[in-house]
Amino acid sequence: MLSDLKGYHKILLVIGTILLMIYTLFPFFIALSTAFKTKVEIYSGDVRWIPQHFTLSNFIGMWENVSFARYMINSIIVCVGTSLLATTAAAMAAYSLATMKFRLKKIYMNLIILTQMFSPIVLIIPLYRMLININLSNNLFGLIILDTAVVLPFTIWLAYGFFKTFPLEMLEAAEIDGCGKLGILFRIIMPIIKPGLVTVVIYTFAFAWNEFLFAYTIITKSDLKVVAVGIFDYVRMYNADWHYINAALLVAVVPIFILFLLIEKNVVKGLASGAGK
């Protein structure tokens, strides 16, 4: 009887997983189907998953009608900059919190994560005024700073979980051998916990790639806009050309997809080691 219940439990788990995957991937399938259809077929009212007339003209038209290449370059600059800055800062903060002992440490850690309770909408006006005062509005570096500030509290906690498991005896041995704090961090700890740091990198990269509010608010120059804002402006300023929009959405997914394929093994290791803590 118990074995039968376990068998039913596994079946229900598999069915639930399949339904969740369908629900999650359904918008992607729609975009994939629409991107390769002609405009006439899309607006004909005949619903088909497989295009009758397979075409690549939507992708060509998207590159010609929209400054999509410029948007992609800007997004990559912002994402790489945010990932490097946030990961480095989070690693140094997590290293200090994991190895140093001081009073009210637990309260300080809770205050860090408490900042995640504040919505970016609440902070957007003071942050925007601050960027204007330091001449960083309409500047990709200003956007990198804002994205880093928003994502940093969670990445510190994420990195702290990996640093906390590092054996203190190894750190003490390195100090006896004359290795400084930064040397211990960059030469000893970071190479060992690389899968965990890769998890931090891909989280910050995906966050910066999908971030819209700050990018839409502080960037008004067309040659500095990122992909998310560029697609939104196209929909807002022109007619909803769904064949171009869906083609743009597919292209926008490619960098995240390629990044995950390149570092997928490290991400799995990082998540597995994080689950084992």
Image (cartoon, rainbow, N blue to C red):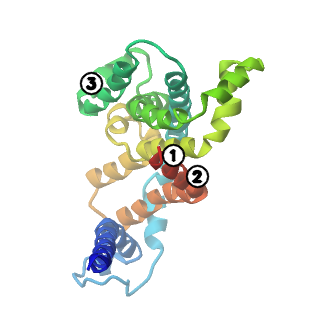
Q: Earlier in the sequence, mark 3 or mark 1?
A: 3
Circle 1 sits in a helix, a strand or a loop, which is it? helix
- Side of 239 relative to 112 (left or right): left
Asked if residue 266 shows in the view, the reply is yes
Circle 2 sits in a helix, a strand or a loop, which is it? helix
Q: Are marks 2 and 1 in contact (CB under 8 Å)?
A: yes
Mark 3 — residue?
125
Task: Identify whether 140 is placed above or below 31.
Answer: above
Q: List x then y, in percent, for residue 179.
A: 74, 20
Q: List x then y, in percent, for residue 83.
A: 52, 38
> Which amino acid is tagged 1?
Thr
**Mark 3 and mark 1: Cα distance apart in space:** 31 Å
Who is closer to the viewer here, 63 or 109? 109
Mark 1 — residue?
199
**Mark 2 and mark 3: Cα distance apart in space:** 38 Å
Mark 2 — residue?
266
- Side of 190 relative to 113 (left or right): right
> Which amino acid is tagged 3?
Ile
Outermost top residue: 103
Q: Residues within 10 Å of mark 3 (few under 14, many from 20)?
A: few
Question: Residue at the location (51% across, 46% down)?
Answer: 199
Question: Residue at the location (37% across, 65% down)?
Answer: 246
Q: Total label count?
A: 3
Outermost bottom residue: 52
